[in-house]
Amino acid sequence: MDYANHTWTQDFILAGFTATGTWQPLAFLGALSIYLLTLAGNLFIIVLVQADSGLSTPMYFFISVLSFLELWYVSTTVPTLLHTLLHGHSPISSAACFIQLYVFHALGMSECYLLGVMALDRYLAICRPLHYHALMSRQVQLWLAGATWVAGFSAALVPASLTATLPFCLKEVTHYFCDLAPLMRLACVDTDWHARVQGAVIGVATGCNFGFILGLYGAILKAVVQLPSATNRAKAFSTCSSHMIVVALFYASAFTVYVGSPGSRPEGTDKLIALVYALLTPFLNPIIYTLRNKEVKEAVRRVTDRIRTILKRP
């Protein structure tokens, strides 16, 4: 009990990155620019899907849900990254640290489940086209989107609560936000059992979803190659390629960091890999879903023409 009380009353120190001299303002401006562009890009997708009726399909509904999730996901960690780049070592209370840990993992696991739902949507659209709109009604879309958030925030309770109940003897976190492995290195006790349980929970959640996605895309690939028209095959592949790129980026970094023992990686590598899934991936998602998408470009044109028409009215 004394250990628990001490854990929740002490402060941690986020070490962040050791950028000095001219590199410090450049690193800060670079991270700030990516953060602002990420917010703008994801907000753009949300507004566009709502503004254009041509994008009122299940696929774009789930893309807008992903963008909404990414807004919160990137905002959970990047402000502390910017603070450490600007001020160096930054103190953070244990309560704020554990809340950040929980919310970050809850949003990350929600995204994991959402990517599985998006793969299911593509499977139904391509392999069950005649029943697609009946199976993926608006009510089903809302239910699936809500279920991903409930599942993500429920699953994240296990690793977050196990970490929060550890007794900590050190307080400098070798990271720019509170994450599992850097916090567990500060504990006064052996954390091997905790790491195994956390790895199992996160591994099952990500592994099962990844296997589910691979199975769905295997069925999609089989259906697409049997299409008689090369045009239809190209169109089917184009609707899936963006999602496949996002899945590859997300799962590659997630498996690298969270599957396996925290002690198996050199100290300090976690924060470098974290830049990929906590900053770079949310930044790239809007680009991946828009630049190669003719429907989005046409929607932008329609919305732009509508705005111009409104502005020209006397």
Image (spheres, rainbow, N blue to C red):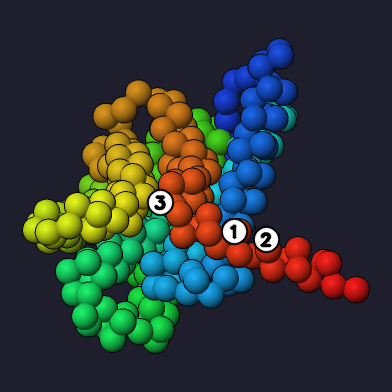
Callout 3: helix, strand or loop? helix
| Label 2 neighbour load within 10 Å: few <14, some 14-19, many 20+ | few
Image quarter hosting the C terminus: bottom right
Between disc 2 and disc 3, the foreground one is 2
**Residue type indicated by callout 1:** Val
Q: Residue at x 70, y 30 (%)?
A: 29
Evaluate whether residue 6 shows in this view. no
Crowding at dot 1, Cα within 10 Å, few <14 / some 14-19 / many 20+, comes out as some
Q: In the rendering, at what x and y percent does residue 312 appear?
A: 83, 67
Q: Position of residue 118 (x, y in %)?
A: 33, 64
* Residue topped by disc 3: 163
Label 3 – label 1 distance at C-alpha: 45 Å
Q: Inspect the image, locate mark 3, and give the three-letter code of the amino acid beneath it.
A: Thr
Q: What residue would you read off at disc 2?
A: 304
Residue that carries the numbered disc 1 in the rendered image? 300
Q: Are marks 3 and 1 in contact (CB under 8 Å)?
A: no
Residue 81: x, y in percent? 61, 37
The reply to whether discs 1 and 2 touch (Cβ–Cβ < 8 Å) is yes
Q: Amino acid at mark 2?
A: Thr
Q: Is residue 301 visible?
A: yes
